Structures are given as structure tokens and as C-alpha cells.
């Protein structure tokens, strides 16, 4: 079975070069989908689209002033599931409208982290959104044991990814795919 999958993976890579983003091999089901429906973009297949979003986001982390779309890609490079991305997008919208230069006293950037949180979770300098997003993920994660997050909680943030938290409402485009 493993030999068959390896053979198919190699064959698909030879037949469909360039389908992988960020020098990462595309999942085999994405390549098979592309071969079955050659006139359709692979991104139309939901799981392939999310794979693409996660890998593209890794290239935008260093940008000084990314667009909202690029910020959404960066967020998905940390919160790797569709539900995780959407929840993180909602909190980022409510906290800062995805604006990397957002400030509220000691709280700043996309996830409005304070001085001590930025120091503890590696989110400095203040207005570097890529670091702020990484720090927010580490804070949300609560530390890792055996590569897995411990808490996975939006508890420290004033704004939560659900309605009724007293924060601003979320337009529908915020939770749509970038």
C-alpha cells in the first residue's frame, strides 16, 4: 500500500509539476482532483484550498505592511484548520480590523497583546503583525506538550470568536476564504 502511494505521488509530481505551493508537495488527493478535473482550479476543492492558504501564508510573515488578504493567509499558517482560521479571523477583526498598526494604550497590532504578553510569547516589536500573530497563536495555544496545544482558549482576549461579547459585529467577508 505504501509503495503504491509513493509511486502515485511520484507519478503525479511528474505529470503535474507546479501544483505545489511554497515548495511543499500538494496532498495526493489534490493532485488526483486536478487530474480528474483539469479545467477546474484545485483551490475549488475545499481541503486543497486550505492547504494552499496555509502554505502561502508562510511567505507573507515577514511583510511590514501586508494587505488584509495577506494577513488572513498569515493567520491560517498558524491556525491550520478552516474552523481555527475563521475563529482567529473573527478575533483579529474585532480586536484591530486586521490593522497591524492598531494601538490601544499598551495593547497593539493585530491581536492587541499587552507588553508582558508580547514579551512572554515572542510578539515584539509591537507593530510587526507577523510576530504578533505568532505570539497570539502561542498565547492561545497555552504551550505545547508533545507538539500539541494545551489550552486552545480565546479567554485572555476581550473579543471572542462568537457574538454577544460586546465587541463590534463581524461582516460576512471576514470569515470568507481569502
Image (spheres, helix red, strand yellow):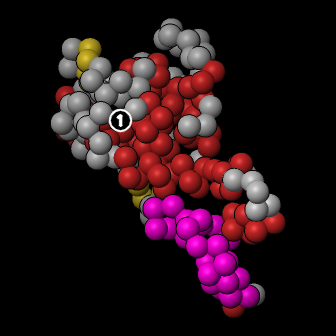
Q: Residue at x 38, y 20 (%)?
A: 96
Q: Residue 58 appears at what percent x and percent y?
A: 40, 53
Q: How many marks?
A: 1
- From the image, which quarter does the C terminus lie in? top right
- From the image, which quarter does the N terminus lie in? bottom right
Q: Nearer the viewer, residue 43 or 61?
A: 43
Part of the protein shown in magenta: 4-29
Q: Residue 176 appears at what percent x and percent y?
A: 62, 31
Q: Tell me if residue 42 comes above or below residue 8 in the rendering.
A: above
Q: Residue 165 appears at what percent x and percent y?
A: 53, 13
Q: Nearer the viewer, residue 136 or 175?
A: 175
Q: Residue furthest bottom?
A: 3
Q: Residue at x 38, y 52 (%)?
A: 59
Q: Residue at x 66, y 78 (%)?
A: 15
Q: Is residue 36 visible?
A: yes
Q: Is residue 150 visible?
A: no
Residue topped by disc 1: 66
Residue 140 in the magenta stretch? The answer is no
- Classify 10 Å Cα crowding around label 1: few (below 14), some (14-19), many (20 and above): some
Q: Residue at x 34, y 46 (%)?
A: 61
| Picture quadrant of residue 3 | bottom right
| Picture quadrant of residue 173 | top right
| Horizontal relation, residue 92 to residue 4: left or right | left
| Horizontal relation, residue 164 to residue 42: left or right | left
Q: Secondary structure at mark 1?
A: loop
Amino acid at each position: 500500500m505504501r509503495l503504491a502511494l509513493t509511486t502515485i505521488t511520484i507519478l503525479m509530481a511528474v505529470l503535474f509539476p507546479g501544483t505545489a505551493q511554497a515548495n511543499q508537495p500538494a496532498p495526493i488527493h489534490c493532485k488526483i482532483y486536478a487530474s480528474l478535473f483539469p479545467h477546474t482550479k484545485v483551490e475549488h476543492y475545499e481541503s486543497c484550498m486550505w492547504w494552499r492558504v496555509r502554505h502561502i501564508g508562510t511567505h507573507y510573515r515577514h511583510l511590514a505592511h501586508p494587505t488584509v488578504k495577506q494577513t488572513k493567509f498569515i493567520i491560517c499558517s498558524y491556525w491550520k484548520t478552516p474552523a481555527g482560521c475563521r475563529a482567529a479571523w473573527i478575533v483579529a477583526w474585532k480586536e484591530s480590523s486586521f490593522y497591524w498598526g492598531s494601538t490601544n494604550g499598551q495593547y497593539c497590532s493585530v491581536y492587541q497583546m499587552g507588553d508582558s504578553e508580547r514579551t512572554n510569547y515572542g510578539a515584539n516589536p509591537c507593530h510587526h503583525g507577523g510576530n504578533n500573530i505568532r505570539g497570539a497563536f502561542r498565547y492561545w495555544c497555552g504551550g505545547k506538550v508533545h507538539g500539541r496545544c494545551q489550552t486552545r482558549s480565546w479567554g485572555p482576549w476581550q473579543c471572542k470568536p462568537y457574538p454577544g461579547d460586546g465587541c463590534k459585529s463581524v461582516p460576512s467577508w471576514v470569515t470568507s476564504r481569502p
